[in-house]
Amino acid sequence: MRFAPTAEQSDLRAVVRDLVRELCPPAVVRAAPDSAEVATLRAGLIELGAPGLLVPEAAGGLGLDENYLVGMMIETGWAAVPLPVVDTFAFAPGVLAVADLTGDRFCGADPDARGTVHYGHNVDLVLTGGFAGTGTIQVTAASGGASVAAVDPAADLLRVTAGPVLATVDDPEVVATAWLRGVLGAAAQLIGLCRRMLDLTVAYVAARKQFGVPIGSFQAVKHHLATALLALEFAEPAVARAGYALAAGEPDRARAVSTAKALASDAAATVARAAIQCHGAIAYTTEYDLHLYAKRAWALAAEWGSAGWHRAAVARELLSTERES
Amino acid sequence: MDLTWSDTEQDFRAEARAWLTEHVPAEPLPSGDTRAGFAAHLGWERELFAAGWSVVSWPVTYGGRGASLWEWLIFEEEYYRAGAPQRVTQNGIFLLAPTLFDFGTDEQRDTLLPRMAAAEDLWCQGWSEPGAGSDLAGIRSRAVRDDAAGGWRLTGQKTWTTRGAFCTHLFGLFRTDPDAERHHGLTYFLVPLDTEGVTVRGFERLDGDEGFAEVFFENAFVPDNAVLGGVHEGWKVAMATTGSERGLTLRSPGRFLQAADRLVELARRKGATGGLADRVADVWMRAQAYQLFTLAQVTDIVDGRSVGARSSLNKVYWSELDIDLHETALELLGPAGQEDGPWSRGFLFSLAGPIYAGTNEIQRNIIAERVLGLPRR
């Protein structure tokens, strides 16, 4: 028993952390999707081998498992990387492998077939279907589309124009695993986003003075942030456990992933709200950076099954009469 | 990342499970917070001790079996899973004993620990006073040096002393330096309750059991070897046990996993749907999260990193989870939940969680200041 990342898992996470801290400061989150900064970030992630993280070495990937994915997703979440990292590094690899489409392409996932993808100008392939781990996933070539206004300014939400179909994947196990990896990736990104929002807020309330003292010395502010930290600290191990369950192929992996996403989404809502409240008016402007992370968190909390969706899934399983006691 | 148990650990679990299955009383014992129930629980405690299960993590010389932290967690899981009785000896075993291991003399350890393990000496905690609750450093009970007799004379009052009316000994803080203020000049004393000048009065808790006591000291004499740790160093010594009380030792995840599983069974029986089913799932997931957080924490401890102020995270989380869990059960039960029973008793008990061992308001201050690093003032 050892519930902590291995040295190798920590090392990979540190490499990702260094990369995104260098290449993805807030200015890059704010940059246009076709800017040179975003292109450099994208190239850096490809050079790191991120698209091939979950691809077997024989197929040219890194051959790593979901334990590594968690660390990578926490760090890219912390930086709010404005690229479809969950779609590309978590959801797509298994699907592309069976379709023989593995490569350094960025993918836009549309699991519930709404007709939209995020970071649309940086998407080479569109993967449609697979919500709840059922049905088929269709892979099409991206062929542009119409921008859709979204709360998250970096979302680059695109209503996609149907492109040529490259593959339709219907292997139930591949579809189920792809979905669970996507959910896990989103949950891990939420952990990173929570940490970033708390980091920003702790620094702000320690520096900001009212009544002659830092506002972080007031008990009301302390309690808000302690409550936010609690939500984060107890969601994080559930996310690590879900990664382990997927990597080890444990029978309860779907429930572990739902638990992770529900707790991480709830934590994101709690942390975002506390962060905004503790900042005060400065949080209610797009000139300050907090909104970049809060809006990303709200989007990820709503996608890949919301907290309520996953809670209901866990409830169904726990309360089903077929369950052994 | 490795969430599998070793063969040794699995054998340990199997042995614990087999013994508990055979020995846990079929009928629940009466509440250990009543005089009759306490006596019944002592019988159970001595049975545990005789089989070597009363203090599994202690060294064998003191009555334990030298179990690792992991094995201790396994034992706790099995203990709650088996529905075994509450541990009426827990304040000695889980709060005083870690302090004795860290600060006691060889003589204190050799005399006190085996008797504690065997449930012969029964220890209660003397921290709070009428004027010192959350503000524990406001303690006014005092100990005055008696050089002629070679010891100390205790005067003052302790209160909220759990099971004080049934215990034989008290560990508590007394002011030894009258000129020192706040957390300076306090000393940690070990006091037999049959000492002349000590009076104990039990009183009812919220649930109607005589689980509380106030303890009065009137010039009660204790010898020098009743001091645990250094004279005037009681605060430092005491903080070591409040760390235990908040964190790992008193509230093992097994307790909440078992309660969450019982809640799921209740919800299935009641055919819970919709919002109530969601609340059941939420509580169940949080119980899992508490276990996972603890596993990560034990990994840290095994790796040599200290838990420190992070034990306040445990305390707030489990205590609030415990209330939500019982509120959900009572909602499932409807008016029947207001009858005396395990869920209603558990609910009343859960309400104490955010108060004892430092209120959750104090814990949130600690989390903000010592984990997040916010300014004290």
Image (cartoon, coloured by chain):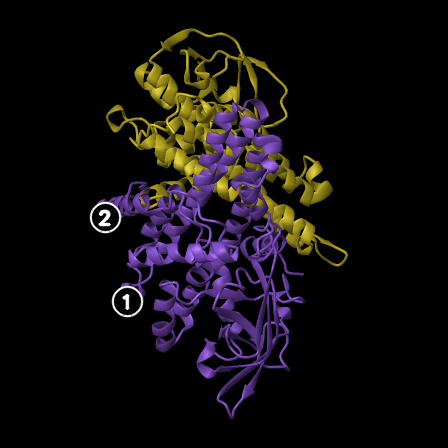
- The outermost residue toward the bottom is B148
**In this view of the protein, can residue A293 be seen by the observer?**
no
The dot on residue B61 is: 1
Mark 2 or mark 1: name the one nearer the start of the chain: 2
Q: Colour of chain A?
A: yellow
- The one of A320 and A165 positioned closer to us in this rendering: A320
* Amino acid type of the residue that numbered disc 1 sits on in the rendered structure: Thr
Question: Which amino acid does the dot numbered 2 rest on?
Answer: Thr
Residue at the limit of the structure toward the front, as seen here: B36
Q: In percent of the image, x 32 and y 30: which residue is there?
A: A250
Toward which corner of the image does residue B304 lie, by quadrant?
A: bottom left
Q: Which residue is mark 2?
A: B8
Tell me, yes or no, whether the two marked residues, 2 and 1, touch with CB atoms within 8 Å. Answer: no
> Which chain's colour is purple?
B
Report the chain holding disc 1: B
What residue sits 50% from the left and 15% below the top? A112
Q: Assess disc 2: are there few (<14), some (14-19) or many (≥20) residues with their C-alpha within 10 Å of its C-alpha.
A: few
**Residue A307: x, y in percent?**
54, 28
